[in-house]
Image (cartoon, grey):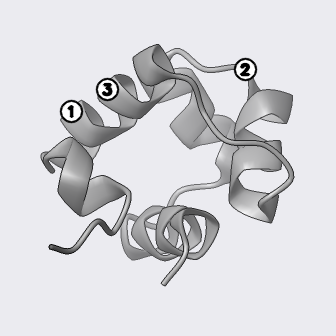
Amino acid sequence: MTLSEHLLQLRKSKGLRQTELASKVGIGWRAYQTYERGEREPGLSALIALADFYDLSLDELVCRKR
């Protein structure tokens, strides 16, 4: 699973719109939209905010497997 697919799945599991999620984590809506579309990757501060919101480690958020 890619990061963009995971972000979409996580957001939908919470029943949130992109605008709602972006507001809750302090990310611009358009920036978040590009993450979910796979057009851009989030920076470290956005990744941390998303991981905190979903109560995941950064590895879990980005689907990193060893």
Q: Mark 2 or mark 3: which comes first in sequence?
A: 2
Q: Residue at x 41, y 32 (%)?
A: 47
Q: Secondary structure at mark 3?
A: helix
Where is mark 1, residue-wise? Answer: 52
User: In front: mark 2 or mark 3?
Assistant: 3
Q: Are marks 2 and 1 in contact (CB under 8 Å)?
A: no
Q: Are marks 1 and 3 in contact (CB under 8 Å)?
A: yes
Query: Where residue 8 appears, x then y in whole percent?
Result: 58, 69
Amino acid at the residue labelled 1: Asp
Relative horizontal placement of residue 57, taking residue 21 as reference (left or right) = left
Tag shown at residue 3 = none
Q: Secondary structure at mark 1?
A: helix
User: In front: mark 1 or mark 3?
Assistant: 3
Tag shown at residue 48 = 3
Amino acid at the residue labelled 3: Ile
Tag shown at residue 28 = 2
Q: CA distance from mark 2 to mark 3?
A: 15 Å
The image quadrant of residue 41 is top right
Q: Residue at x 44, y 21 (%)?
A: 44
Relative horizontal placement of residue 6, taking residue 27 as reference (left or right) = left
Q: Residue at x 43, y 15 (%)?
A: 45
Label 2 CA crowd tier, 10 Å (few <14, some 14–19, many 20+): some
Q: CA distance from mark 1 to mark 3?
A: 6 Å
In depth, the one of 8 and 15 nearer the eye is 8
Quarter of the rendering occupied by the C terminus:
bottom left
In depth, the one of 8 and 64 nearer the eye is 64
Q: Mark 2 or mark 1: which comes first in sequence?
A: 2
The answer to whether residue 45 is above or below residue 47 is above
Amino acid at the residue labelled 2: Gly
Q: Secondary structure at mark 2?
A: loop
